[in-house]
Structures are given as C-alpha cells and as structure tokens.
Amino acid sequence: MSKLNQESLKKAIHEMNTNKAKRNFVETIDLQVGIKDYDPQKDKRFAGSVKLPHVPRPKLKAIILGDQVHCDQAAAANIPFIDAEGLKKFNKDRKQMKKYFKPYAILLASESIIKQIPKLVGPALTKINKFPTAISPNENVVDKISEALSTIKFQLKKVLCLGVAIGNLNMSEEEQRQNTTLGINFLASLLKKNWNNIRTIHIKSTMGKSHRIFG
C-alpha cells in the first residue's frame, strides 16, 4: 500500500510549477530517492523498468539498428537508422561508434540484427553503454520508440540514492502527479521491505529548488 500523501505531492507539484521562471528549454522533473537499511555490498541490487502514463522526456533522440523492414519503417517516419552494412563499416572501432551513437539516448535493434551484433561490432556497444533494446519482427519502430520514451529504469548501484527523470514542466500538474505516483509505487515494490526501505523522496525541476514529498 502506498505511503505517499497525495495532498503533499499535489502541493509540492503546484509550488514547483508556480515558481518556475521562463526559460529557453523545457525543464525536466527529477525524482530523487534516498534508500535506507540496504547494503549494496551484501543485499541483492535491484533493477526494474516501468512504463509511465506520460512521456517524461519527449525530446530524447532514438536510432534504429534495423533489418530491411524496420529500416523502411524508420525512413517513412523520418527516424535515424543504420543497417548491418552500415554497422560493418565501423570496423569494430569503439571511438567511431562512441562518436556516432553519442547523440542517441535510445537504441533499438531488430532481433536479427541483435544476433549479429557480436560479429558486426564486437563488444563495443556494451563497452560504451549503448547496447540496443530488441524489436521483434511484428513490432513497429514508431510504437517501440514511444514505449521506450515512456519507460524509466530504477537501478541500485553502489550508493543509496536514486535519481530518475519522471516528467517535465510542459506537462499538466495532474500528469506530473500520475507519473510521480506510479514511479514511486513501482520503486517501493522493488525493495525488499517496500516503503520501509525508503528514507526520503524529493522532486526537483532542472533549475528549481528541491521539494520533499516523503520522509
């Protein structure tokens, strides 16, 4: 059961939106969570992804590593793509690939291409933290990108704090509330003692002040 007080959350979101200054870019809203009673060295490190009802960062760029069908779909939708021959031309050069894929936050690859990646590019994409997500033959690249843009990932590493983009200031306050509530409740479900492992939760826009909503 959620321990997040919805009135406190609504108030924090309203304050964040009321005090925003006019800027040349859309501010992202980050969810910042402090974890307690967890030992990253001994306890199993958790990781989980959840699809939010509203896209938190719509301007993230995507590229398709596609077979013929997915490359055609990408071309029709004006989405950047590269095929097996294009990947081969990197000649497994990690520096070239790092530079080429740097602008893209989302990499999606046809299942047939994923199977060829070790042969085409070696371990380079894994090393630069850009290994793609698979697209099955019957999935459409536009739908898959939309799904990827809506999905956030929680992953505990060595420190007991997590940060993830949960929304943006172009959203309505209700959309921000829905994303925040779903994201937090999902994170609590990943923890071994659920809400008892959460010390504090804050939300913060890129240039705004931090608002505590739990703890």
Image (cartoon, rainbow, N blue to C red):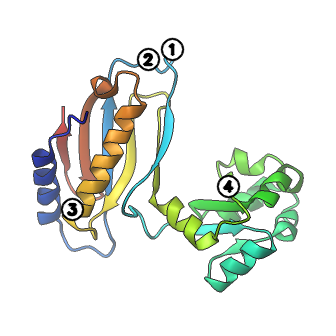
Residue 133 pos. (x, y %):
65, 54
Which circle's residue, 2 or 4, is located before the other in the chain?
2
> Can see residue 117?
yes
Distance of mark 3 from mark 2, alpha carbons? 35 Å
Mark 4 and 1 residues: CB-CB less than 8 Å, in contact? no
Instruction: Tell me the mark number nearer the camera, choosing from 3 and 1.
Output: 3
Mark 2 and 1 residues: CB-CB less than 8 Å, in contact? yes
The residue wearing badge 1 is 42
Mark 4 and 3 residues: CB-CB less than 8 Å, in contact? no
| Above or below for 143 versus 2 | below
Could you classify mark 3 by the number of other residues whose Cα lies within 10 Å: few (under 14), some (14-19), or many (20 or more)? few
The residue wearing badge 2 is 39
- Residue at left offset 82%, top offset 64%: 87
Distance of mark 2 from mark 4, alpha carbons? 30 Å
The residue wearing badge 4 is 132
Mark 2 and 4 residues: CB-CB less than 8 Å, in contact? no
Side (left or right) of 62 relative to 207? right
For the residue labelled by badge 4, is the local secondary structure a helix, a strand or a loop? loop
Query: What amino acid does circle 4 point to?
Result: Pro
Query: What amino acid does circle 2 point to?
Result: Asp
> Can see residue 207?
no
Instruction: Tell me the mark number nearer the camera, choosing from 3 and 2.
Output: 3
Residue 65 pos. (x, y %):
73, 65
Which circle's residue, 4 or 1, is located before the other in the chain?
1
Residue 15 pos. (x, y %):
11, 57
The residue wearing badge 3 is 174
